[in-house]
Amino acid sequence: MENYQYVIIGGGLAGGKAIEGIRERDGKGRIALVTAEPHRPYERPPLSKKYLRGEQDQEKVYVAEAGYYDDPSITLLTATEVTEIDPEAHTLVLEGAQLDSDNREMTYDKLLLATGGRPRRLPIPGNELENVFTLRTIEDSANIRAAAGPGKTSLILGGSFIGSEVAASLSMIGTDVTMIFPEGRLFERVMPPEMSEWLHMIYASRNIRIHPQVTAERFFGNAAVERATLSNGAMPTIDLVVMGVGIELNTQLAEQAELEVRDDDKAVLVNRQLQTSHPDIYAAGDIAAWPDETFGKRLRVEHWDVARNQGMLAGRNMAGAGEPYTTLPYFFSDLFDLSFDVWGDLSSWDETVRRGELETRNFAFYYFADGKLAGVLAMGRPDEESKPMQKLVRARPSYEDVAKPLSDESVNLSDLLGS
């Protein structure tokens, strides 16, 4: 039975960055990274963007070059699953075709769960047909690209990030695109109505048909999908379907190990150092719900920046750093030639204040929840506004103190930090 000072379960960005975090503190400790996928750790944002469009080759998707894992103190086990954790004995049970009978268990001193999630596959009759896709892996993205292209017709389920990014990318490679979703507008949960309407016009200008409050009822075809029945009575002919309707968390191992998880979404509860309810087991990325100091509540964020920063910090803390996670939540998205950044917590908000103009693609929306600033979504704003807007979100000023000056571009954001 092999013993490692550090074991990481999960081959996404959080798991990959955890190795870097460990190495910042411990240059020699033995590390094992176990991933169920056949790849070394990689990033997921390109899968709905440049990699999907064929603008970025597969090597650019990986967190580190292949040679990085040639270090004799690093063991990378791909196509391997952890089936059981014994927190008290500090042992793992492994399953994988490459393992012999002597290598199906390992022991650890510190363990990181960075298991992410799996895409939801809606229980629609016909969803087992070929070319009905979800998007989470390199293979998913490559298969969608192979099925798409000029002359092909696609149906996208979902009007938030994955659905909208995939719709934009497929349109850019010549695919005919229809989007449907049950909400009343694009990005309903994270964008104010005027921004949703603006994006709707941009998508329409790219010949993407958007049908809010419409769902798919059935898919038809012999082997591959050929047609769908929609809740509005339409029966479009299609060559592929992409379901971009969120993920379910891979926290079965955490539950099996009797770690503390949240009731509603099964997120793994961690402290400010990203430790779970067992002090030798850490969690990072999509599955981790941490106590956020800015908002005074637990947050869980499914985005690149959180996975990157939490992976690095978890690695450092496994190696003894003992540092709290205090990074302000951040994410970004690219739609066609549009890019926007978001800082803060947009999970709940009551009203927004706009600074700048949508038509110029130079604006920011400031979000307020219960009368306090909760976050900001920015596109094309001057560089000198970036740090002040983040500091404002951390300061959480009241709506009545800052709403009017925020909308006035002649007011310097830095002047509002004392409000």
Image (cartoon, rainbow, N blue to C red):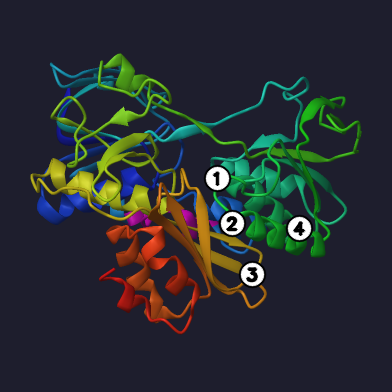
Amino acid residing under circle 4: Ser
> Compared to 195, does 289 lie above or below?
above
SS for dot 2:
helix
Residue at 21% across, 39% down: 274
Q: Earlier in the sequence, mark 4 or mark 2?
A: 2
Question: Is residue 59 shown in magenta?
Answer: yes
Q: Nearer the viewer, residue 44 or 384?
A: 384
Q: Nearer the viewer, residue 57 or 86?
A: 86
Give the Cα distance between marks 3 and 2. 16 Å
Between label 3 and label 2, give the one nearer the viewer: 3
Give the Cα distance between marks 4 and 2. 14 Å
SS for dot 4:
helix
Q: Which residue is mark 4?
A: 171
Q: Which residue is mark 1?
A: 138
Give the residues drawn in magenta, as a range. 58-67
What numbered label is drawn on residue 337? 3
Question: Badges 3 and 1: C-beta atoms under 8 Å apart?
Answer: no
Residue 73 position in % (x across, y down)? 18, 44
Question: Badges 2 and 1: C-beta atoms under 8 Å apart?
Answer: yes
